Image (cartoon, rainbow, N blue to C red):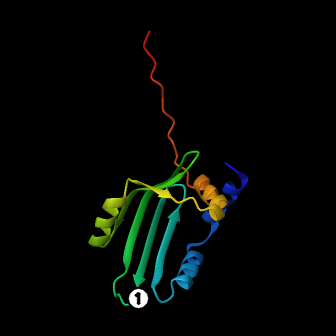
Amino acid sequence: MSFKAGLLKIAIKLTPDIVVRWVANFILKGIAELSEFHFDLDARTAYLQGTLCGEAEPIEVWLEDFAIESDKESHRLIIHQARSNRPWLNNLFSRIAGKSWNIPAIPQFHDQIELAAEVFKTENPVEEEIGEAD
């Protein structure tokens, strides 16, 4: 892992959820209000609770086991499991979960995409070799 990726992982882990909510609410003013946010980089989970403007009930979203898969030429986002407290959103998640989505190669964001790919890379479990019995 590069030095930049290591620093970014530390920054993500140390950033309080309230700061993320404050920034998101500043950006989403007039569209939605984020009331809860929890992100665990090691466990690859995220929880969001927000209310769209004009709506009474908040929408909750749980993301589990997400990563960026990379090869020499491209990057793909994959979300293995996602669910919500809204049936229509669950139906949408069922269509995208478990599939790889290409991340467009945008030349001016190449370095940022490479860094994100390193931070969120797929964790490959070590496969055990089974030897023959003598």
* Extreme residue in the top direction: 134
- Residue 9 showing in the rendered view: no
Where 108 falls versus 50 (above or below)? above
- Residue 110 showing in the rendered view: yes
Q: Which of the pair 114/63 is nearer the observer?
A: 114
Q: Can you give x and y, in whole percent of width and height, for residue 82 in the image?
A: 37, 62
Count of numbered labels shown in the rendering: 1
Q: Can you give x and y, in whole percent of width and height, for residue 78 in the image?
A: 45, 55
Q: Amino acid at mark 1?
A: Cys
- Please report the residue visible at 51 percent of the width from the left and 65 percent of the height from the top: 39
Q: Is residue 53 left or right of residue 92?
A: right
- Please report the residue visible at 56 percent of the width from the left and 77 percent of the height from the top: 18
Q: Secondary structure at mark 1?
A: loop
Q: Which of the pair 67/72 is nearer the observer?
A: 72
- Please report the residue visible at 46 percent of the width from the left and 80 percent of the height from the top: 35
Q: Which of the pair 32/76 is nearer the observer?
A: 76
* Extreme residue in the right direction: 3
Q: Can you give x and y, in whole percent of width and height, for residue 59 in the image?
A: 37, 77
- Please report the residue visible at 34 percent of the width from the left and 83 percent of the height from the top: 57
Q: Which residue is mark 1?
A: 53
Q: Can you give x and y, in whole percent of width and height, for residue 32 in the image?
A: 45, 84
Q: Which of the pair 37/52 is nearer the observer?
A: 52
Q: Is residue 2 left or right of residue 99?
A: right
For disc 1, the neighbor class at 10 Å (few under 14, some 14 to 19, many from 20) is: few
Q: Which quarter of the rendering shows the C terminus? A: top left
